[in-house]
Image: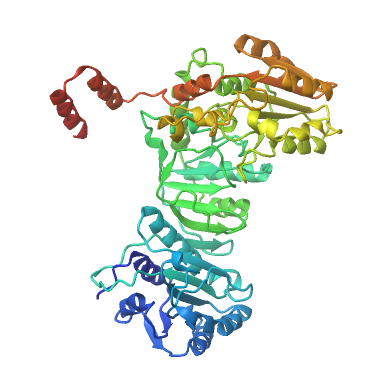
């Protein structure tokens, strides 16, 4: 058996087999030759020929209806695919699982008057349930994209009662048929609440919770029971809003640049919630996503299963399938290693920065406080902090932009005027959303801390791609110097004229002298703005300190070698380190 060497087509053939698609109606042409030539002699497939693409699609409808199986159709470029429209419309309204596989030259040729190149990027609403564009594979990212999109389309033809889908494949017109074995492709499967669930064979399980609304006690209890039965741990960020027993904030441990913890290598990761801004550096070869939307969200490029259901249904069902409890060794290992690395953090050595401020503020806030955290520096800084307190945390990670957090805080404050809403925002984001501070109906329960470092401090960090490459980021990339260039009077005068109580700090002592007034749970007569002035250099140094708490033996030896050994001795040491 000989297959094409076009990788995206090999992925397609492999996944057609994995998703049990055997029946294919092929129409003649040149653009899809690599695909048809590869499958026509593969005994797995039942290939039928039809010259007329319109008839081919209707043939597939009859074949799918009678057999109860999905049926693929394939044609060449130019107007051949247009002839599928009427048959796909029929399939759409009858919910028949037809998979239209069309082929195209490089998509950059669309609209360039190249013969037989049409734009298939947009389809009518009632033609297919999903249309995906699959590129040729050159880079690793292309391979992932091809695998993901084909999986998604093949799953969609069986979802919500079934229906047609469209897969548009780019081809390089390769004439090489030298591949003798199909790749072993990652398969993504979707489950519904009444399906037979897969077994959990992993010795330990991590649940990762991204941004999430407040959880019911019933859901929290179900997650706790799941951890107790499957040796689990719950990895969170400050927007997860999980307040159960087995919570861990993993970023301090997981994001170390040296002394990498083996706990990051997770056997099974269950992903719930929405977009996280924690940037937690974890590694798992097997990820299950649980969400009522049932969508394929392959954030970590290791997704294997999607459970289209409520989280409570998922955990309850697994809890019912296992009676005995596990030993919680996995949670205990995470807790032990995290406690160990936390004990090495000396906050007296950390400069006056968002990280230091987050730590001190978290100690002062009451349990149950509601906090809104700006991306990126503020949210990251808080995620280094581990606390037993239960905060309700939110961040605008959906769009993940600079805009809107002040407005979000004001909106949240209206829901309950007797509940204090705390916000922590950088200077650029504050001034970007400044108009919301001037709304006439601001309540006294609003308290906003502005960390003013004079610009986009993220771009000044030692590990950012701009500054790390020696690029001058200050004037244009970080937009330093706007909004009064850390003026001590601009925001003060603006706030006080609008009726805010304004306080400020430029160092640790001033901060500690004022934090009580800001963090107290006592309701005040005025909303509060607490402006804290830091420097980009201190912010970068604080981040570097936190990411380098652990020092590996290997890194220490390498650094020593750089400093004191000659070139021959360095080569010898490198050889030892590779063994």
Report the colour scheme.
rainbow
Residue 160, position as x, y percentages in the image? 60, 69
Position of the N terminus, as image quadrant, is bottom left
Total marks placed = 0
Direction from residue 106 to residue 90 in the image, left or right: right
Examine the rendered structure and indicate whether residue 275 appears above or below residue 304. above
Residue at 63 percent across and 38 percent down: it is 402
Where is residue 115 drawn, in percent x and y?
43, 77
Task: Let me know if residue 529 appears in the view.
Answer: yes
Q: Nearer the viewer, residue 493 or 307?
A: 493
Nearer to us in this view, 225 or 5:
5
Residue 316 vs residue 356, the one in the foreground: 356
The answer to which image quadrant residue 391 occupies is top right
Quarter occupied by the C terminus: top left
| Residue 522 seen in this snapshot | no
Instruction: Name which residue lies at 41% across and 30% down.
Output: 468
In the picture shown, does residue 189 fall above or below 560? below
Image quarter of residue 304? bottom left
Residue lying at 52% horizontally and 44% vertically, measured from the top left: 207
Depicted 359 relative to depicted 105: above or below: above
Horizontal side of residue 521 vs 560, given as left or right: right
Horizontal and vertical percent for residue 162?
57, 74
Where does residue 125 sit, x and y in percent of width and height?
64, 72
Residue that protrudes farthest toward the front in the picture: 113
């Amino acid at each position: 058996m000989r297959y094409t060497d076009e990788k995206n087509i090999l992925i397609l053939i492999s996944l057609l087999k994995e998703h049990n698609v055997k029946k294919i109606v092929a129409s003649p042409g040149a653009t899809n030759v690599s695909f048809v030539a590869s499958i026509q002699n593969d005994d797995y497939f039942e290939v039928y020929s039809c010259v007329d693409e319109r008839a081919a699609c209707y043939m597939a409808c009859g074949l799918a209806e009678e057999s109860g199986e999905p049926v693929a159709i394939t044609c060449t470029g130019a107007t051949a695919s247009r002839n599928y429209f009427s048959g796909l419309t029929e399939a759409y309204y009858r919910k028949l699982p037809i998979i239209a596989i069309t082929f195209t030259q490089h998509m950059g040729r669309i609209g360039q008057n190249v013969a037989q190149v049409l734009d298939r990027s947009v389809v009518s609403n009632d033609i297919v349930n999903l249309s995906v564009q699959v590129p040729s594979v050159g880079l690793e990212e292309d391979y992932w994209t091809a695998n993901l999109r084909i999986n998604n389309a093949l799953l969609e033809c069986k979802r919500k009662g079934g229906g047609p889908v469209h897969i548009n494949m780019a081809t390089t017109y390769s004439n090489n048929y030298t591949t003798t074995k199909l790749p072993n492709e990652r398969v993504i499967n979707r489950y519904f609440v009444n399906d037979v669930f897969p077994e959990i064979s992993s010795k330990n399980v991590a649940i990762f919770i991204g941004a999430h609304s407040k959880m019911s006690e019933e859901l929290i209890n179900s997650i706790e029971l799941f951890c107790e039965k499957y040796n689990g741990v719950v990895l969170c960020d400050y927007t997860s809003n999980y307040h159960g027993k087995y919570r861990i904030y993993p970023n301090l441990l997981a994001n170390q640049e040296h002394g990498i913890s083996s706990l990051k290598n997770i056997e099974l990761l269950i992903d719930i919630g929405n977009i996280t801004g924690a940037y937690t550096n974890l590694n798992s070869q097997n990820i299950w996503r649980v969400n009522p939307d049932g969508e394929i969200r392959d954030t970590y490029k290791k997704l294997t299963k999607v459970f289209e259901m409520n989280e409570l249904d998922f955990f309850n069902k697994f809890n019912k399938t296992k009676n005995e409890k596990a030993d919680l060794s996995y949670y205990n290992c995470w807790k032990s290693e995290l406690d160990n690395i936390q004990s090495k953090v000396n906050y007296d050595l950390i400069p006056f920065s968002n990280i230091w401020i987050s730590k001190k503020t978290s100690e002062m806030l009451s349990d149950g406080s509601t906090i809104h955290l700006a991306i990126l520096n503020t949210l990251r800084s808080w995620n280094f902090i581990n606390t037993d307190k239960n905060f309700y945390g939110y961040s605008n990670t959906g769009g993940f932009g600079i805009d809107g957090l002040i407005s979000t805080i004001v909106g949240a404050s209206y829901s309950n005027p007797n509940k204090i809403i705390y916000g922590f925002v950088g200077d650029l984001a504050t001034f970007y959303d400044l108009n919301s501070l001037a709304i006439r109906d601001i309540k006294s329960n609003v308290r906003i801390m502005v960390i003013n470092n004079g610009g986009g401090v993220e771009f000044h960090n030692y590990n950012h791609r701009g500054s790390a490459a020696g690029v001058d980021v200050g004037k244009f990339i970080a937009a330093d110097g706007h909004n009064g260039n850390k003026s001590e009077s601009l925001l003060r005068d603006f706030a006080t004229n609008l009726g805010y109580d304004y306080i400020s700090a430029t160092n640790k002592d001033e901060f500690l002298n004022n934090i009580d007034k800001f963090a107290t749970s006592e309701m005040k007569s005025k909303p509060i703005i607490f402006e804290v002035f830091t420097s980009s250099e201190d912010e970068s140094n604080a981040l570097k300190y936190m990411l380098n708490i652990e020092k590996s033996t290997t890194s220490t030896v390498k650094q020593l070698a750089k400093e004191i050994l000659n070139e021959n001795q360095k080569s010898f040491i490198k050889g030892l380190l590779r063994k």
